[in-house]
Image: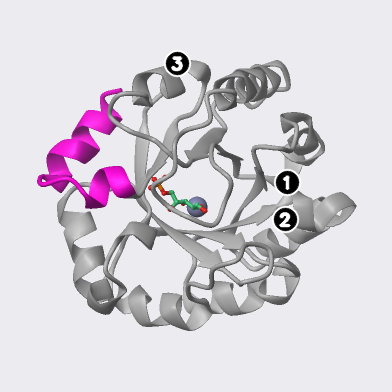
């Protein structure tokens, strides 16, 4: 599968957000991963829909909004109106209502994804295959950039890709988030992920374009 690279702006300087998105575009990023944290589901607070609204006129990049919040259903309308291209929600917060929340996102004309944390079995994603445009597997405990990739995530990716193949969606995007480096990207892609989120790896590199290309060639 074609690998897509989704730099996470969590690792960037928020005071220069407009330039950050321009640099990402020039560097060939496929998506921009925007980490929304509410101080409840995860301890830190980052930004909300207003930030996305302000960024939207500055970039054509696909805005992949990862909602690490309680009550994500209360935020989806504002993110859709702000110009989000995709909204992902955690099964840990949505529980049995995950399908309903995903359908509400799609009804707003926005792509939808379901996410599992490292401690949540990947089987929690299975019920929502008909309601998603992407699955997201967290490969670190959410909340902070710069953590180490949890190796057990590879098994989860394999299981999830096998499930998608078996159930008629072999090409569904599977995104992996946390600790992705040029060194482990090959194994991650081989395990079945095709959308690689990378925060520190991209923003700490001296040559963003070369790093994005190296990840994409994984
Ligand atoms: C973690 C976020 C990630 C984070 C990844 O809570 O969801 O998107 O930015 O950062 P790196 O790539 O540095 O592990
Ligand atoms: Zn994220």
How far apart in space, not on screen, are marks 1 and 2 (Cα)? 6 Å
Q: Earlier in the sequence, mark 2 or mark 3?
A: 2
Q: Are marks 2 and 3 in contact (CB under 8 Å)?
A: no
Q: Residue at x 15, y 55 (%)?
A: 26
First in sequence: mark 1 or mark 2?
2
Is ligand 2 within 8 Å of the beta carbon of the residue shown at mark 1? Answer: no
**Mark 3 C-beta to ligand 1 under 8 Å:** no
Residues 17 and 201: in front is: 201
Q: Is residue 130 above or below residue 87?
A: above
Left or right of 27, for residue 139: right
Instruction: Please tell me which residue is depicted at 53% across the width and 66% down the height of the picture.
Output: 36
Residue occupied by mark 2:
102
Q: Is residue 45 above or below residue 153?
A: below
Question: Which residue is disc 3 drawn over?
Answer: 190
Horizontal placement of 59 versus 190: left or right?
left
C-alpha separation, residue under disc 2 versus residue under disc 3: 28 Å
As drawn, the label of residue 131 is 1
Give the image location of residue 94, x and y in percent.
80, 57
Residues shaded magenta: 200-218
Circles 1 and 2 in contact, beta carbons < 8 Å: yes
In the image, residue 9 sits, relative to residue 114, either above or below, namely below
Q: Quadrant of the C terminus?
A: top left
Q: Residue at x 36, y 30 (%)?
A: 3
- Between disc 2 and disc 3, the foreground one is 3
Measuring 74% from the left and 64% from the top, which residue is drawn there? 104
User: Which SS class for mark 3?
Assistant: helix
Q: Which mark is residue 16?
A: none
């Amino acid at each position: 599968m074609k690998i897509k690279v989704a730099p996470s702006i969590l690792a960037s300087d928020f005071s220069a957000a407009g330039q950050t998105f321009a640099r990402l575009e020039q560097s060939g990023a496929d998506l921009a991963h925007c980490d929304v944290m509410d101080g409840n589901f995860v301890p830190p607070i980052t930004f909300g829909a207003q930030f996305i609204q302000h960024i939207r006129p500055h970039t054509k990049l696909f805005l992949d909004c990862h909602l690490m919040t309680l009550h994500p259903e209360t935020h989806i309308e504002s993110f859709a109106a702000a110009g989000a291209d995709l909204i992902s929600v955690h099964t840990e917060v949505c529980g049995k209502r995950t399908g309903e929340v995903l359908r509400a996102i799609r009804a707003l004309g926005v792509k939808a994804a379901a996410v599992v944390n490292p401690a949540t079995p990947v089987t929690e994603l299975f019920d929502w295959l008909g309601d998603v445009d992407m699955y997201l597997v967290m490969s670190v405990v959410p909340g902070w950039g710069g953590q180490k990739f949890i190796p057990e995530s590879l098994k989860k990716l394999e299981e999830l890709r096998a499930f998608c193949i078996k159930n008629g969606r072999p090409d569904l995007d599977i995104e992996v988030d946390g600790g992705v480096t040029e060194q482990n990207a090959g194994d991650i892609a081989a395990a079945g992920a095709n959308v690689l989120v990378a925060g520190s790896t991209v923003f700490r590199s001296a040559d963003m374009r070369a790093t994005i290309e190296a990840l994409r060639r994984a």
